[in-house]
Image (spheres, rainbow, N blue to C red):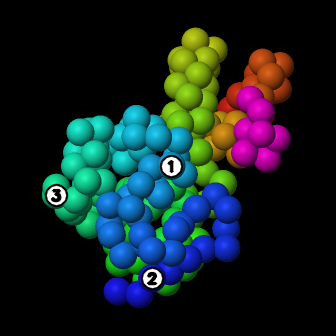
């Protein structure tokens, strides 16, 4: 395995430590805000993450992919230490580098609850379109949609 360093401050890879899978997992964990956050995003327990980080066991490929996507780092780098940590793996969600699955989940819950109250007659396709539009607004504006705008989107999408 070759040692890789990163020019990107967020990854914070130390030259002598990337040969160890546990250290690369630690980098991924720091990028998502800690063990608890990674546990939720990668759908593994905190105790399992700690074992992987300590080298007591190794993750399956699916877990590596989940962790890499959650952290916005390359799966190849996380698994092997080779290549660029920033190399082309988008963070989790819809294949978009700006996707935020936690926000998407919250938006979907809110919008679907509103639709159940206001427009229970909408087709599943129309409901999905509304969730997508509200989520895209959130991504572009970096803030939730206000109630009046949300009502307008619901009414417009209902007639589409």
- For this orientation, the residue located farthest to the bottom is 2
The 10 Å Cα crowd at callout 1, few under 14, some 14 to 19, many 20 or more, is some
**Rendered location of residue 126, percent (x, y):** 60, 39
C-alpha distance separating marks 2 and 1: 19 Å
**2 versus 60 height, above or below:** below
The 10 Å Cα crowd at callout 2, few under 14, some 14 to 19, many 20 or more, is some
**41 versus 87 height, above or below:** above
Name the residue tied to disc 2: 3
Among the 4 quarters of the image, the one containing residue 120? top right
Relative to the observer, which residue lies in front, 121 or 135? Answer: 135
Q: Residue at x 77, y 28 (%)?
A: 145
**73 versus 46 height, above or below:** below
Precedes in sequence: disc 3 or disc 2: 2
Among the 4 quarters of the image, the one containing residue 118? top right
**Rendered location of residue 130, percent (x, y):** 65, 37
Name the residue tied to disc 1: 30
Left/right placement of residue 130 relative to residue 121 reads: right
Are circles 3 and 1 on residues that touch, CB within 8 Å?
no
**Visible residue check, residue 95:** no
Q: Quarter of the image containing the N terminus?
A: bottom left
Callout in the foreground (3, 2): 2
- In the image, the segment drawn in magenta is 138-144
- For this orientation, the residue located farthest to the front is 16
Residue 142 shown in magenta: yes
């Amino acid at each position: 395995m070759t040692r890789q360093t990163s020019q990107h401050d967020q990854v914070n890879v130390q030259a002598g430590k990337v040969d160890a899978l546990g250290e690369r997992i630690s980098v991924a964990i720091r990028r998502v805000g800690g063990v608890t956050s990674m546990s939720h995003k990668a759908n593994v327990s905190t105790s399992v993450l700690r074992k992987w980080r300590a080298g007591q066991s190794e993750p399956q490929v699916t877990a590596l992919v989940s962790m890499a996507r959650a952290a916005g780092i390359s799966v190849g780098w996380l698994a092997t230490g080779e290549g660029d940590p920033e190399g082309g793996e988008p963070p989790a969600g819809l294949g978009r580098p700006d996707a935020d699955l936690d926000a998407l989940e919250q938006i979907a819950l809110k919008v679907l609850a509103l639709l159940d109250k206001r427009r229970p007659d909408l087709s599943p396709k129309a409901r999905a379109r509304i969730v997508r539009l509200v989520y895209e607004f959130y991504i572009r504006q970096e803030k939730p949609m206000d109630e009046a705008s949300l009502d307008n989107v619901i009414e417009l999408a209902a007639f589409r």
